[in-house]
Image: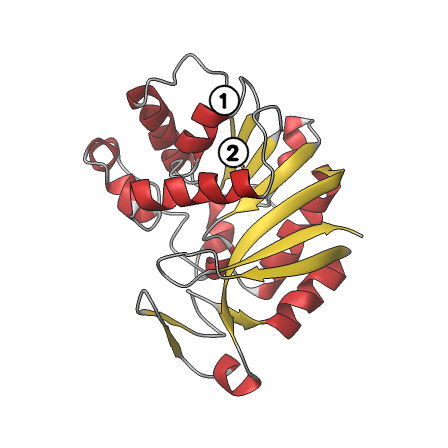
């Protein structure tokens, strides 16, 4: 697959580059869904409860403008945070957010890729996370991402990812209003929802085990899954 952000054209709008003016106006925060402080803190607190240590190598897949990344960089030891995103303008905005948070002296690893290529970091990861990424992707992209993360995950590593989850085949083929949050999801267009049988199938295709965690107090009803190497 060519390394061009246009691969997402028609799937979701996240390939659209923000101007410098929009970044200065902090529109990058809205571009990743807003709730900047709330969701950033939620991510960090969840992973800490799951065992994330400052010494761990953390991969933030679809890191955007570092809504969670700022919190992770502050918590982790130097040179332990690795963020990957399709949108270079969001990564640039994330660097500004780090500087504004007084974290510009920490070594942070950020890279641009449209094909989830975390191998470019040449690191094995103790933990990986994808918040509000799979909610915007179709099945084939998710399977590709799972397979790519598996290739860089430590033997006992964990990959935490959120989904909009529905409970039946009838719901899967319908449009659903997620509560709380009032987000309308469907099986064929962004934002996407899936049922557990399909999530399990994606895990199987990627050669990963699935542990469904479910509710983790996300304000828009995204549910948490944990993938690990079989």
Q: Position of residue 73 (x, y in %)?
A: 46, 26
Q: Residue furthest right?
A: 230
> Mark 2 touching mark 1, by CB under 8 A?
yes
Residue 84 seen by the camera: yes
The answer to whether 51 is drawn above or below residue 16 in the figure is: above
How is the model colour-coded?
secondary structure
Q: Residue furthest top?
A: 105
On screen, residue 118 versus residue 164, left or right, reads right
The answer to whether 112 is drawn above or below residue 220 in the figure is: above
Of 65 and 80, which appears nearest the observer?
80
What is the number of the mark on residue 209? none
Q: Position of residue 40 (x, y in %)?
A: 38, 40
The answer to whether 140 is drawn above or below residue 40 in the figure is: below
Which residue is at a point 67% across and 53% down the rendered structure image? 227
Category of crowding for the residue at label 2, using alpha-carbon neighbours closer than 10 angstroms: few (below 14), some (14–19), many (at least 20): many
Q: Position of residue 151 (x, y in %)?
A: 74, 41
Of 160 and 18, which appears nearest the observer?
160
Residue under circle 2? 83
Q: Position of residue 163 (x, y in %)?
A: 51, 61
What is the number of the mark on residue 108? 1
């Amino acid at each position: 697959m060519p390394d061009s952000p246009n691969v997402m054209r028609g799937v979701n709008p996240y390939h659209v580059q923000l101007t410098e003016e929009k970044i200065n106006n902090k529109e990058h925060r809205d571009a990743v869904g807003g709730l900047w402080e709330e969701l950033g803190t939620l991510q960090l607190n969840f992973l800490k409860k799951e065992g994330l240590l400052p010494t761990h190598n953390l991969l933030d897949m679809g890191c955007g403008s570092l809504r969670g990344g700022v919190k992770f960089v502050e918590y982790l030891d130097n040179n332990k945070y690795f963020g990957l995103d399709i949108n270079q303008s969001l990564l640039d905005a994330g660097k500004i957010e780090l500087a504004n948070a007084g974290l510009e002296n920490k070594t942070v690893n950020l890279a641009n890729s449209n094909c989830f290529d975390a191998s470019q970091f040449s690191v094995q990861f103790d933990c990986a996370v994808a918040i509000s990424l799979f909610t915007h992707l179709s099945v084939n992209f998710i399977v590709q991402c799972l397979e790519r993360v598996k290739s860089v995950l430590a033997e006992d590593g964990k990959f935490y990812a959120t989904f909009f989850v529905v409970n039946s085949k009838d719901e899967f083929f319908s449009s659903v209003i997620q509560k709380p949050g009032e987000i309308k999801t469907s099986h064929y267009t962004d934002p996407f929802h899936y049922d557990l049988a399909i999530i399990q199938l994606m895990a199987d295709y990627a050669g990963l085990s699935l542990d469904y965690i479910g509710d983790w107090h996300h304000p828009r009803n995204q549910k948490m899954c944990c993938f690990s190497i079989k």
